[in-house]
Image (cartoon, rainbow, N blue to C red):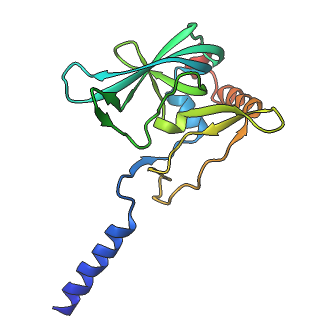
Amino acid sequence: MKRAVVSVGLLLALAVALPAAASTFLAMDQKALLQHANLVIQGQVLQVNSFWEPEGRLIVSEALVRVEESVVGDAPSVVVVRTFGGTVDGFTVEAHGFPRFRVNERLLLFLGAEKNGAAEVVGYQQGQFRVVRNRAGEEIAVPTVDGGANLLNPDGRPLPRLQAVPLAALKDSIRADVRSLGPVNRFQE
């Protein structure tokens, strides 16, 4: 009987130690993001709208993003990006680890196509970087992975928090990875 009590106690202790509202995602490196992306863009959010999807079960948000630069691939001047979560008529769905958009923010996005014509961010928040200036005026790409998202390596180990990097260096690294992926990469077709 004592053994069962210890096991239940251990399970309760583990449950308390886990974040209450966390989402867990398989970590994707830059090459994996590129293998699933159709575009990589830098742009500014013009508008964000949230609505119930047609079946009325989920709230989704759409952001209109003006493309400042197509880092990889051919992008139109404005891209529609759709994600899970948002607020409609006082109902809010907060989806940890899913991209979030604010009007006027500048972003670098790894985008994949959805069947309805809107794009989606590849790798959830892993494919979204905020573009800001540091104190020296240099543009920096800041990962958007929030505290409610856990990234795990394929072996199950947690991934260390992603760090901000100079925007120019990130774009150079993305272009180099596209070249290294070879002629089978859809960006080079």
57 vs 176, left or right, is left
- Furthest toward the right, the residue is 136
- Furthest toward the left, the residue is 1
Can you give x and y, in whole percent of width and height, for residue 38 in the image? 52, 20
Residue at screen point 25% across, 30% down: 58
Can you give x and y, in whole percent of width and height, for residue 88 in the image? 30, 26
Quadrant occupied by the C terminus: top right
Can you give x and y, in whole percent of width and height, for residue 118 in the image? 41, 16
- Furthest toward the top, the residue is 77
Q: Nearer the viewer, residue 103 or 188?
A: 103
Q: Quadrant of residue 181?
A: top right
User: Quick check: 57 above or below 114?
Assistant: below
The image shows a total of numbered marks equal to 0
Q: Nearer the viewer, residue 91 or 179?
A: 91
Q: Nearer the viewer, residue 52 or 123?
A: 52
User: Quick check: 106 above or below 91?
Assistant: above
Residue at screen point 38% across, 63% down: 18
Residue at screen point 54% across, 33% down: 127
Quadrant occupied by the N terminus: bottom left
User: Quick check: 172 above or below 68?
Assistant: below
- Furthest toward the front, the residue is 90
Can you give x and y, in whole percent of width and height, for residue 156 in the image? 45, 58
